[in-house]
Image (cartoon, rainbow, N blue to C red):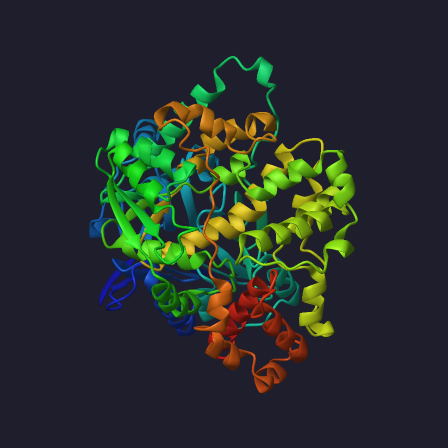
């Protein structure tokens, strides 16, 4: 262990031995008193808890009233000189940072010319450090990239923290009467504060959505920074503010002075080029669908032969789109890596995913992202993905259903109020006809609600009535968090852009981005999302909704911009998307876990769920007419497995 004394700062560098490879992790403690050995030991435990996030270097810094820790996966300037926590030459300022600043070279030149900064490393971390030293929060809008960081001023004993515009990187924190703790993971936070108490409002929300939207977490008193949010902590208290809002003003299509598809194409191409900055090998995810195919096309125009990674499902031909991925790889010149995943392999990965979750999260497609990331990491350290396109441009079936529901035609009039008549029909995800009946029932239920509640019900996987049966009444809290209410309050049936914006804030930030970040980081893989370049997002959100989606379908703008680059009619087929074989899992490989976690004694001691309702749910989920109950039972199982690992440890 190496100790360096400088202005009352002690720096510790050490290795943790073999680890799973995961991207950077940060942690910090701001104290109203002198730090003690207990605080330092807590930081050491937090670093161990985050060790999967950074295999390349781990360190912590102790100042009189603050302690900071960092674990690193090296992407830019992989030398030791760029390790963190990073302090300026005077020792006054210290930064712990997780993310990438794509325009760091441009910002570096500006800082040299404006302030005469003398850079020691070639890292984006040092650029961010000096940008914050000289400009503070005014520097944030100049960053093109994704990040979560803590920036400390020793002289003023002031901590500044911020999260990127769209929530690509996580940031957990808790602030008591005097002290503040933060980290990249929920587990690391609890190692710092040493207390764990379930938030029942978050539990109720989780069972409905299958995830927990920021700023809430499953633990009482622990929060997430919202996307585009920051705070300052000093002796005068904690001040939180939003530093970035997604612009909402729409430009009339007829008044646009540029060709919209061409302008969109240029924005996306620039975004991809920015995300090719790396000192380590990179590749791309390729599903065979429109979003990832376009990203693969653009990457290979700048770096021919870039590896593209796809999953195939030999046992599930209905969902297997690997043949399309092969065609796109050949068409774009990508070096294709096809990963055939058989049912028994899916089964084997389930425990790995369940044991990696630091907060209950029941999007079952996380299993597939985990497998894809594991194989991709064998070849590259960075991958680009197509995430964000669906939320930006109306690519989900839900979007088409919401748009369809606005019509006053005979179909909607006939289906409105027909829920009782449809109730007895079989439904499920395991058969084409049953799946259509499931969607028809869901559509009918939504039509009877006002527009905002319709959006909410269609965003949920589990109905409120089902959750009411599952939880003990004293643990049930159906009131929605204020941030969810804020999102719903912006939804307007006269402006479909409000629906897309709500999805960006709710679904994208808390489900899709969390899924990709957590699963890819299980294997030390950094995933970059070109569709979420803020300049591109601001351009797309400024356009009328009908440029993006109409009754023929979504992502119109993406199709128009790139239709000439692909074989004629290639993207006319509907994207199927992989449905996890949840019914199969619950009857087979997950059955022993269900026996363990739904045991009568366990449920009684836990005091959260109604035992008889859980048994009824299990019978329904494993029946021949399961409906959506398998997803609900999976959400319960994920929570129970997390609870046994996390709350009972």
Name the spot of residue 175 as percent of width and height, x first. Answer: 56, 61
- The residue most toward the bottom is 601
Q: Which residue is drawn at 52% across and 58% down?
A: 430
Q: Quadrant of residue 124?
A: top left
Nearer to the camera, 438 or 159: 438
Nearer to the camera, 92 or 282: 282
Is 619 placed above or below 107 here?
below
Name the spot of residue 154 as percent of width and height, x first. Answer: 41, 53
Name the spot of residue 532 as percent of width and height, x first. Answer: 45, 37
Nearer to the camera, 631 or 421: 421
Is 264 placed above or below 159 here?
above
Quadrant location, the N terminus: bottom left
Q: Total label count?
A: 0
Nearer to the camera, 502 or 463: 463
Is 376 placed above or below 598 here?
above
Asked if residue 398 shows in the view, the reply is: yes
Q: Is residue 94 left or right of residue 360?
A: left
Name the spot of residue 193 as percent of width and height, x first. Answer: 50, 69
Q: In this view, does 122 lie to the left or right of 45?
A: left
Q: Residue at x 40, y 26 (%)?
A: 562
Q: Which residue is drawn at 26% across and 41% down?
A: 278
Q: In which quarter of the image is residue 368?
A: bottom left
Asked if residue 103 shows in the view, the reply is: no
């Amino acid at each position: 262990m190496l100790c360096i004394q400088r202005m009352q700062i002690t720096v510790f560098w050490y290795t943790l031995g073999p680890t799973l490879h995961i991207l950077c992790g940060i942690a910090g403690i701001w104290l109203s008193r002198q730090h003690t050995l207990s605080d330092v030991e807590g930081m050491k435990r937090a670093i161990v808890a985050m060790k999967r996030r950074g295999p390349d270097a781990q360190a912590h810094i102790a100042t009189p009233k603050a302690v900071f820790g960092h674990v690193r996966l090296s992407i830019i300037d992989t030398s030791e000189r760029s390790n963190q926590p990073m302090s300026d030459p005077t020792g006054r300022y210290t930064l712990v940072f997780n993310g990438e600043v794509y325009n760091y070279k441009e910002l570096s030149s500006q800082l040299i010319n404006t302030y005469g900064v003398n850079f020691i490393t070639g890292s984006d971390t040092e650029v961010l450090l000096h940008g914050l030293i000289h400009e503070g929060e005014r520097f944030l809008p100049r960053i093109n990239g994704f990040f979560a960081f803590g920036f400390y001023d020793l002289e003023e004993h002031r901590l500044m923290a911020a999260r990127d515009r769209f929530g690509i990187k996580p940031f957990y924190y808790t602030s008591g009467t005097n002290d503040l703790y933060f980290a990249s993971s929920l587990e690391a936070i609890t190692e710092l504060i040493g207390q764990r108490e379930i938030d029942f409002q978050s539990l109720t929300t989780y069972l409905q959505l299958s995830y927990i939207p920021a700023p809430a977490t499953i633990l009482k008193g622990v929060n997430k920074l919202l996307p585009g949010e920051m705070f300052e902590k000093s002796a005068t208290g904690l001040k939180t503010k939003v530093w970035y809002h997604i612009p909402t003003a729409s430009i009339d299509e007829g008044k646009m002075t540029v060709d919209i598809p061409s302008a969109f194409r240029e924005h996306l191409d620039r975004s991809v080029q920015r995300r090719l900055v790396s000192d380590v090998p990179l590749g791309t995810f390729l599903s065979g669908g429109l979003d990832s195919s376009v990203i693969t096309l653009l990457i290979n125009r700048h770096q021919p032969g870039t590896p593209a990674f796809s999953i195939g499902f030999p046992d599930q031909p209905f969902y297997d789109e690997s043949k399309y991925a092969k065609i796109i790889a050949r068409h774009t010149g990508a070096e294709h890596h096809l990963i055939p995943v058989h049912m028994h392999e899916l089964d084997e990965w389930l425990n790995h995913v369940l044991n990696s979750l630091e907060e209950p999260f029941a999007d079952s497609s996380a299993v597939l992202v985990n497998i894809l990331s594991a194989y991709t990491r064998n070849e590259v350290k960075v991958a680009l993905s197509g995430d964000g396109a669906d939320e930006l441009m109306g690519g989900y079936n839900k979007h088409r259903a919401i748009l369809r529901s606005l019509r006053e035609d005979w179909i909607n009039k006939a289906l409105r109020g027909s829920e009782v008549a449809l109730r007895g029909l079989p439904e499920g995800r395991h058969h084409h006809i049953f799946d259509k009946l499931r969607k028809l029932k869901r559509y009918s239920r939504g039509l009877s609600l006002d527009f905002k509640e319709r959006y909410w019900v269609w965003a949920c996987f589990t109905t409120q009535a089902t959750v009411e049966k599952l939880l003990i009444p004293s643990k049930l809290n159906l009131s929605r968090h204020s941030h969810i209410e804020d999102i719903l309050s912006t939804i307007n049936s006269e402006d479909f852009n409000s629906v897309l914006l709500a999805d960006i804030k709710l679904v994208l930030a808390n489900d899709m981005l969390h899924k990709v970040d957590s699963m890819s980081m299980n294997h030390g893989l950094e995933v970059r999302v070109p569709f979420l370049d803020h300049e591109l997002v601001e351009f797309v959100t400024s356009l009328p909704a009908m440029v993006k989606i109409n009754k023929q379908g979504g992502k119109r703008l993406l199709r128009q911009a790139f239709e000439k680059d692909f074989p004629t009619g290639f993207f006319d087929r509907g994207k199927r998307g992989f449905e996890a074989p949840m019914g199969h899992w619950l009857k087979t490989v997950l059955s022993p876990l269900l026996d363990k976690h739904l045991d009568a004694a366990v449920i009684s001691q836990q005091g959260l769920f109604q035992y008889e309702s859980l048994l009824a749910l299990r019978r329904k989920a494993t029946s021949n007419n399961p409906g959506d109950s398998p997803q609900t039972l999976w959400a319960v199982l994920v929570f129970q497995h997390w609870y046994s690992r996390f709350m009972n440890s």
